[in-house]
Image (tube, rainbow, N blue to C red):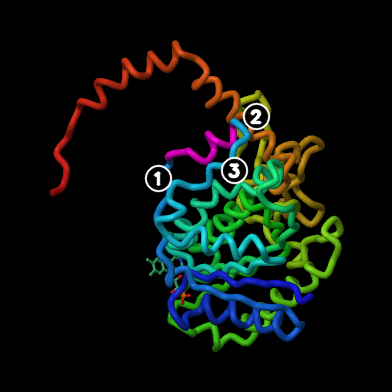
Amino acid sequence: MAYKIMGITAGRKNGNSEILLKEALMACEEAGAEVTMINLRDFHLIDCTGCTACTKAMSTGKHAGCVLDEKDDKKKIMDVMLNQDAVIFSVPTYDLMPASVYLTFAHRSLSYETSFLETIGAIEHKDRVAGLISVGGSTRSWQSMALEGLQATMFTTDMKVVDMLLATRVPAPGQCLLDDKLMARARKLGEHIMEAVQTPADQRKWLGEEDMGWCPNCHSNALVLGEMQWDGLHYPVECQVCGAGGTLEKTEDGKWKFVIQKDGLLKDRTTVAGRAKHLEEIAQTQGGFFSDPVKIKLVQEKKAVYAQKKFKGIE
Ligand SMILES: Cc1cc2nc3c(=O)[nH]c(=O)nc-3n(C[C@H](O)[C@H](O)[C@H](O)COP(=O)(O)O)c2cc1C
């Protein structure tokens, strides 16, 4: 049976994100894949309201879905997306990060927490891979959170990112077509996706540039100074995306590199085990609140002032 590969974009019609995605998908199609492609701009997508009905149900072992399931196209897309072997996301960069059309789509994935749905038997386990393309008018300097923003949205549906491409300096629609190297790299990303889906899941690995980014674990290019975490864990430096912890060291040739420490992958967000640590945090912080009538009452009392306080708005 042919591998199922889906392309999801959020760029202008016939714009750079669409073109680069199509180039990658053509490589997949030529290798025999069954390809589906959508542009999120063609769909009705409502922002997550933050009601947390989905996660509250999950915490009691139930699958409630999303309260907006019947109101827009998110479910229609997810029913297809979760049935793929691989998905390539190609998203324009707006204000250094992925465009909001994509983020609206991604933030609605909470009710599709795949490891949870698999655990309760609502869906079958599937080892999916992903390729990410961020497209902007500038260099990395003005796309500093673009790929990293996309990476951060891969955890909920447990997509293993095997390649990433930052398409730079292509502001005008279709301008990417003037850059043969960029087009070839997009095609390569498609080839990498095909290579990954044909590799047994436990042997799949990063296929992009070996030295891409700071983080040797997830290849993000973003580090933050570590701060004390809820359970007392403290890393000097953390990868902003996967949460790997370690420190900066100078190599013999005078360059800086991020070295992950021994227990630095304890909370690796790219793995189900690492994310489970975050569930422990939620259980402690949020669960500790909802199971404590004294705290709930105190918040209700203090809240009244803020609920009654009104400022001038905009008509
Ligand atoms: C609201 C807005 C904000 C943008 N912000 C950035 C930015 O921060 N960095 C950047 O490199 N390009 C930025 N751009 C340029 C787009 O990323 C660029 O035009 C890209 O080619 C759009 O992709 P598309 O052709 O697939 O629509 C911005 C464009 C718009 C409309």
* Residue 58 inside the magenta-drawn segment: yes
Q: Name the residue under label 2.
A: 280
Label 1 within 8 A of ligand 1 by Cβ: no
In the displayed structure, 52 sits above or below 43; it is above
| Residue type (three-letter) at the residue carrying disc 2 | Glu
Q: What element carries label 2?
A: helix
Q: Is residue 161 left or right of residue 68?
A: right
Q: Which mark is residue 224?
A: 3
> Along the polypeptide, which appears first: circle 2 or circle 3?
3
Q: Residue at x 49, y 78 (%)?
A: 170
Q: Residue at x 55, y 88 (%)?
A: 178
Percent across and percent down for residue 83 are 66, 63
Q: Residue 286 carries which label?
A: none
Counting labels gives: 3
Percent across and percent down for residue 25 are 65, 79
Distance from label 1 to label 3 (Cα)? 29 Å
Q: In which quarter of the image is residue 101?
A: bottom left
User: Which is more toward the observer, 37 or 256?
Assistant: 37
Label 3 within 8 A of ligand 1 by Cβ: no
| Residue type (three-letter) at the residue carrying disc 3 | Val
Q: What element carries label 3?
A: strand
User: Which is more toward the observer, 163 or 4?
Assistant: 4
Q: Residue at x 31, y 22 (%)?
A: 303
| Residue type (three-letter) at the residue carrying disc 1 | Thr
Q: Mark 1 points at which residue?
A: 49
Distance from label 2 to label 1 (Cα)? 24 Å
Q: Closer to the observer: label 2 or label 1? A: 1
Q: In this view, does 208 lie to the left or right of 226?
A: right
In the displayed structure, 182 sits above or below 80; it is below
Residues rendered magenta in the picture = 51-59
Q: Closer to the observer: label 2 or label 3? A: 2
Mark 2 is surrounded, within 10 Å at the Cα level, by few (under 14), some (14 to 19) or many (20 or more) other residues, namely few
